[in-house]
Each structure stands twice: as C-alpha cells, then as structure tokens.
Image (cartoon, rainbow, N blue to C red):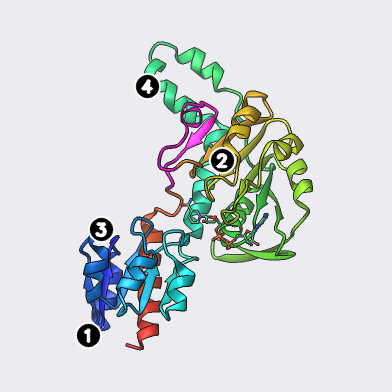
Amino acid sequence: MTRILANDGITVGCKEALENAGFEVSLDNVPQKKLNEELKNFDVLLVRSATKVRKETIDACPNLKMIGRGGVGMDNIDVEYAQEKGIEVINTPAASSASVGELVFAHLFGMARFLPDSNRNMPLEGDTQFKELKKKFAKGVELRGKTLGIIGIGRIGQATANIALGVGMKVIATDPYIDDVTIDVDINGQNIPVDIKTIKFNKLLKQSDYITIHVPGGDKPVIGKKQFDMMKDGVGVVNCARGGVINEVDLVKAIEAGKVAYAGLDVFENEPKPAMQILMNDKISLTPHIGAATLEAQDRIGMELADKIIAFFGN
Ligand code: NAD
C-alpha cells in the first residue's frame, strides 16, 4: 500500500479522497530532526511551507517517490535534487490565486479609507476624540475609476485584474514574458472577456494610481528608490508576492517623503520577524503572510494534491 505522510497537515477532503483511492495517510507532524528516520516508512511526503525537504532528507529516504507542496513556493524543497533522484515533485500553483487577489483588495480598500490607522486609533481614542478622528480620516478616495498597475500578470496578477475590473478600475499591466492576456470577468453568471495588452515597466510606474506586484521572488528588489521616484505622488503600493521584491528601506523613505501615500504588505524581507519600522508605520496596512490562507483555497489545494497523487500512482 502506498503510504503518505502529510507532515504539515491536509484538508479533510484531501485525506478522504486519498483514503478512498486506497492510500494510507498519516497526519502525524514529525519534527524536522526526526524526519529523515521516520520518512523511510513512506512513499509520499506532503508539506506546506514549514517542513524543509533538503538533500540530506532525500538521500536518507530512497523509498520516497513523490514530494507534494500544498501551495506555490517551493523554497523549502530541494526540487532539482529530488528530480535528479527520480522523485516526482508537485505543487498546487493555481489553487490560491483568487484568495491572494482578494487580499490585495482588502489592502487597497482599507488604505483608500485609512482603515489600518483608523483601526489602530478607534480603540484608543474613539470615545474621546471621535470628531478629531472623523476629520483625520475624512479624505479617503474611491477605487472606482482609478488606475491599477499590475506588475507580473501571471496567475495571481490575472486574478487581481479580474477583481479590479469588477470594481470599475482601469487595469494596466507589465510583464516581460506576456504580451497580452484576456481576463474573463464573471459578472452575475455573464462572462465578459477583457483584453489587456502589457506595457513597459516604467510607463506603468508613471501611470498607476495604485501598484500591486505579483512576480516570483528574485535576488534583487523590483521596486526601489529609482522606481518609487518614477511613480505618481500619493501612489498606493501593495506587495502580496514575496518579501524583498520591494526594498523596505526605500519604501519607508518614499512614505516619509510623501511619494507613497500608503502601502499594503502581506510579505516581508525579514519573515518571521519583520522590521519594526515597517510594523509601526501607520501608513502601512499589514497582514502576516496570509494571502493564500482562506478556507476555499485550502480546499482547492487539498483536492488538487489528491487529484495529482491519484493520477501519478494510477489508483
Ligand atoms: P506566476 O508564475 O503565475 O506569475 C508571475 C508572473 O510574473 C509571470 O507572468 C512572469 O512572467 C512575471 N514576471 C517575472 N518577472 C517579472 C518582472 N521583473 N516584472 C514583471 N513581471 C515579471 O506566479 P503567481 O502564482 O501569480 O505568483 C506570484 C507571486 O505571488 C509569487 O511570488 C508567489 O510566491 C506569491 N504568492 C504569495 C502568496 C501569499 O501568501 N502572499 C501566496 C501565493 C503566491
């Protein structure tokens, strides 16, 4: 019988689907130190981001046939090494795109009406300084009609564009590998295809009222001082991609200079200990890397994993 260790947990639906297909599934959370030993008894290892699957583990477990990552990023797995050893490595890249897109809009709607700062101040002064706070947060703006610049129009970029179009924003996008995309906006069961031709990066920086970034993580930031300088005064910037794609020191400086009116961050250069100057900045809307963390995305991740495992083993 094929044995699966889901070391960082899986959904009930995924476990049931696998068991119904004849797999044996363990949800035991084996500590990293004991993983190499314990994993010898399994054919498949499923992880999220917590468990690390490095060369030593792969070498120690010659029986391992598949490593599955529930989610997108595979930084915690030595993918190439595993593949060289003939191990199948799978992930679920599409399952969480809509969830990340909605989180982008949670940040955008919040920042447009000063919710992060308002939520920090209302519990402290809402009963004594109500009128002052009302005045302080009165100059919000609508998103409808504003231009959203999307850097990286892949899966999540497109899911974000979909919402933006529904909200009535103008969407522009830049992507060195994509010339144009068609976004199928589903409104009340009606499908409305909207074509978006990508434009040059610098042009997007100059034209956008809001900018959201959806590129893979790389060695150096995509947005730093030079790019902030090109943006409109009062721009709003969101990073729900990877810590480090926006230079955080330059972001704080751009906020202090009034170039960036507000920012929304779900990911940080120094996770899990983001810089204090980011955490304490009242112009920054903050979430602790929860872009993919919705119940619906978890269900889709689970079902996508189960489907791929069942297809691979031919059960
Ligand atoms: P994807 O591969 O579908 O899309 C990325 C796009 O970025 C591609 O179209 C690529 O051509 C483009 N690109 C690459 N370099 C670029 C550049 N310099 N400028 C402009 N475009 C560029 O990936 P995705 O699934 O949309 O994921 C996007 C990001 O979101 C990744 O960094 C991923 O790790 C992150 N993510 C975050 C969360 C979260 O919890 N916040 C969850 C899932 C994914």
Name which residue type carries label 1: Met
Label for residue 28?
none
Q: Is residue 274 magenta?
A: yes
Eye-nearest disc, 2 or 1 = 1
Q: Which mark is residue 108?
A: 2
CA distance for labels 3 and 4:
44 Å
**Dot 2 amino acid type:** Leu
Looking at marks 2 and 3 on the same chain, the residue that comes earlier in the sequence is marked by 3
Q: Which residue is mark 3?
A: 33
* Dot 3 or dot 4, earlier in sequence: 3
Q: Amino acid at mark 3?
A: Lys
Rendered image quadrant of residue 21: bottom left
Task: Tell me the CA gap for discs 2 and 1.
Answer: 49 Å
Q: Amino acid at mark 4?
A: Pro
The answer for how far apart the CA atoms under marks 3 and 1 are is 26 Å
Q: Which residue is mark 4?
A: 123
At label 4, counting other C-alpha atoms closer than 10 Å, the crowd grade (few under 14, some 14-19, many 20 or more) is few
Mark 2 vs 1, N-terminal side: 1
Q: Nearer the viewer, residue 306 or 140?
A: 306
In the rendered structure, which segment of residues is drawn in magenta?
271-289
